[in-house]
Amino acid sequence: MGAFTRHTIRFGAGCALVLISTLGIPAIAEQEKGPAKPVEQKQEIPVPNREFRGVWISSVFNLDWPSEPGLPVETQKEELITILDNASDLKLNAVVLQVRTMCDALYDSPIEPWSYWLTGEMGKAPEPYYDPLAFAVKEAHARGLELHAWINPFRSMTSIKGTPVPKFHITKLFPDITQQSGHIEVLDPSDDFVRGRVMNIATDLVQRYDIDGLHLDDYFYPYPTGGAYKSSINDDKNWNKYVKEGGELNRDDWRRENINTFVRDLYRAVKRSNPACKVGISPSGIWQQNHPESIVGLSSFHQIYVDSRKWLREGWMDYMSPQLYWKIESRQSFTKLYNWWQEQNVHGRHVWPGIFASGISGPSADGRSAWEVITQIEHTRKNQFKSPATGHIHWHWDAFANNRGGLNTTITNKRYTSLALTPDSPWLAGQGAMGDDDEVEPVSGLKITRPSCKGKSMRVSWNLFANPDELRWICVQSRSGKYWKINRVMPVHSRFFELPSDKYIDEIAVRVVSKIGEVSEPATLPIKPPRPGQKGKS
């Protein structure tokens, strides 16, 4: 470690501030003109732990947030802040917030009407006005949480309409492209206009909001209803047109190709609009029966025309979260399916399975305990195969909100024992996500401002010279003895961190993290006690 200077500033009531800074960097730092070099290290500082720890926050039917349609704006905000606070306390690091449930919007959309689940009246804006997604992004990032905006692509109406549907909803504007499927209404995925509209909605979201990901669920062609084996939808018009124009695919393959084209084009459109924004899809967990061997259940390939394996093998997403909502010991074994999906991951994208935390007691219970969730997480950690980092997403927030089966305590004591950064996505750098920068520049001017009064907190502060538009987090690490841990993950605009002065910490390291997860070299400082005679009175 290089030499250090020490300065004392005294202020009211006899207290003093002791400033420690790197030699040559003023204790009260002025803005410097170039990037700083990391301080020479006495020992190697470990790269921060990485794991995607997400949870779905469902808005449809008011499952998670808001708890009721039409709540006062302040109550909506309070409920969301409570969720985000608790997610942070649990050491989760990402929330997947549903913002489009049935061709509606829980954000200020120029294309679709405000959601009934938000305001209690479809098409009615919040009063007083606020933009829930902008609010959610700001509050999530303030707590070190990624926010992924989750949209349902082709459902146009649920079984509950709530209030009269406004005339500018898609089911009123274009009734010929919507049809009934069981208790819901759906858009026809074979229609070019339908697919184009969803892509317009996706690009609007990633251009106007600083979201970390765009997330699609499993509703493409609708699930079979009424005992039918296959999805039922009337797409005769577009099928006949395809045949007339010389199309050679059979009807099932043509339907699958409609969805393949949509997934491919949406991924490319998002990358043109916002290269750093991750695209994730959570398809049904079983691609085909007997893949892997002995697996049975709904075949998404045959029954709802979804070739999700192809999307992963083509690299048309940044992460896949197959909904593996079964137990380890079952006919649809979680571990067998997870391993199979990893084997399909030829491009080394992220495979972060959906875990059925809501199966622990409550309305959706299937007899599992919190230990089933704990064991499944451990399996993903030990069997990454081709994924660059481990991860998972819990279905859904209600399991944590009600601490089903003691899940909260068990998961923080046994699996989320320390903070983790979300994994990096290195392939995004090649898609223009980092501009002209080859690497993330470290912070400079790192210093500690420590009051001599007992019980006061120390302040760790720094300067930043890199382009903040390409960056997301400041990661503060600390060493106690030989052991390092993450103390805090903060928005990149943060310039200081308060640390209780009575904490036993020997060294501080600060890193910068880009929007695609690249991490800078650390800038470090030792923490040493004030010299004798420098203590003030408090």
Image: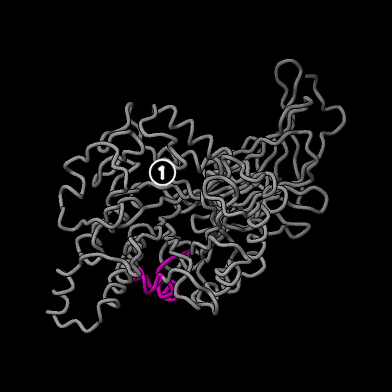
With respect to residue 75, does 282 lie above or below? below
Viewer-nearest residue: 243 or 479: 243
Viewer-nearest residue: 58 or 422: 58
Q: Is residue 457 left or right of residue 294?
A: right
* Residue 32 visible, this angle: no
With respect to residue 382, does 486 lie above or below? above
Q: Is residue 499 left or right of residue 83?
A: right
The residue indicated by pointer 1 is 59
Q: For mark 1, give the secondary structure.
A: loop
Residue 308 among magenta residues = yes
User: What span is in magenta?
Assistant: 300-321
Which quadrant, please, contains the C terminus?
A: top right
Q: Is residue 127 left or right of residue 432?
A: left
Residue at point 40%, 58% (across, down): 217
Residue at point 75%, 21% (across, down): 15
Question: Residue 327 appears at what percent x and percent y?
Answer: 60, 62
With respect to residue 231, does 6 lie above or below? above
